[in-house]
Amino acid sequence: MIFSRRQLEPPRPAGLPSFQTLLDSTDWASLATACGTGESLPAALMLLTSSDPVVRETALHDALGPVTHQNSIYEATVPVALCVAAILNHPAITAAAYSHDATAPPTHPTLVRLLDWLGDTAYDADDGCVAIDERLYGEGSLDEYPEMHAFRDARPAIFSGVQALLGHDNTPVRHAALIAAIPLIEHPLLTQHQTNLAGHARYLLATSTDRHHRDRVLTALKTWGHDTSTLENTADIAARERYARLKAARASWDSNWMGGGYSADPPF
């Protein structure tokens, strides 16, 4: 599988290539990032598998930073995402980190960070983002954005790396895997996973107070046709009402601005 500026080939939905295969078969220097080309990415990606957590922390910045900017998908994003998915089960990444506090549960900071990045990137290429682009730039605008098109085609392969972590024995890992999986299963080949993810989503809502996570799973459940009225707590309802007020205010502002409702030009 070779990724180049001229052609971004989608992966085979049946499986995820090995990490080493992806590193060796990708023409990294030909792929655009937010700050140049991807020439330095293979070394940074390799360091993500270091046994030294300090090295991995630096590698997270060096490997993900160049393809993470302003919610954009770059030419190098797809191979980086596939590499990340391919190393989610690497021993150095799955190894638990223990606190000096013997009563504190073990953590998996690198694994959670990688899952968070996959989830954030998948949301930047989800159906909602495509709909927004089509409203702004016209139907078929996705054809003019091959990088996003390539990421959306890669979702089955990426999901194959995330799926196994939905049953991880560490709660933050399970939740991060769920949040990453939700936008990935919008792919037509993956929609059959909605029922399974809905069960994980209900468990998250019963155990987590994380605002971001709760918003993501509540939105997903509603999109999948589930009644969430008995799953929301008072904080969820307050957040939903706050978002509705902000959305209405933004719509009013946009209407006034586009309709010339201001008596004078806004200050710049």
Image (cartoon, rainbow, N blue to C red):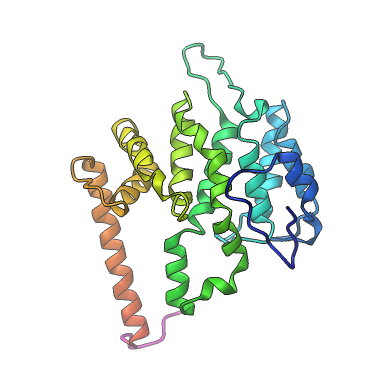
Q: Residue at x 51, y 33 (%)?
A: 164
Q: Residue at x 31, y 54 (%)?
A: 223
Occupied quadrant, residue 149: bottom right
Query: Is residue 235 among what the camera can see?
Result: yes
**Taking 133 as reference, is 96 left or right?**
right
Q: Residue at x 50, y 32 (%)?
A: 165
Q: Residue at x 33, y 88 (%)?
A: 263
**Taking 118 as reference, is 243 left or right?**
left
Q: Is residue 113 above or below residue 50?
A: below
Q: Looking at the picture, tell me which residue is in the foreground, 3 or 235.
A: 3
Examine the structure image and report whether residue 264 is included in the region drawn in magenta.
yes
- Residues in magenta, as a range: 261-267
Q: Is residue 106 above or below residue 50?
A: above
Q: Looking at the picture, tell me which residue is in the foreground, 95 or 192.
A: 192
Q: How many numbered circles are shown?
A: 0
**Taking 228 as reference, is 145 left or right?**
right
Q: Position of residue 128 (x, y in %)?
A: 42, 62
Q: Position of residue 42 (x, y in %)?
A: 77, 46
Q: Is residue 207 above or below residue 28?
A: above
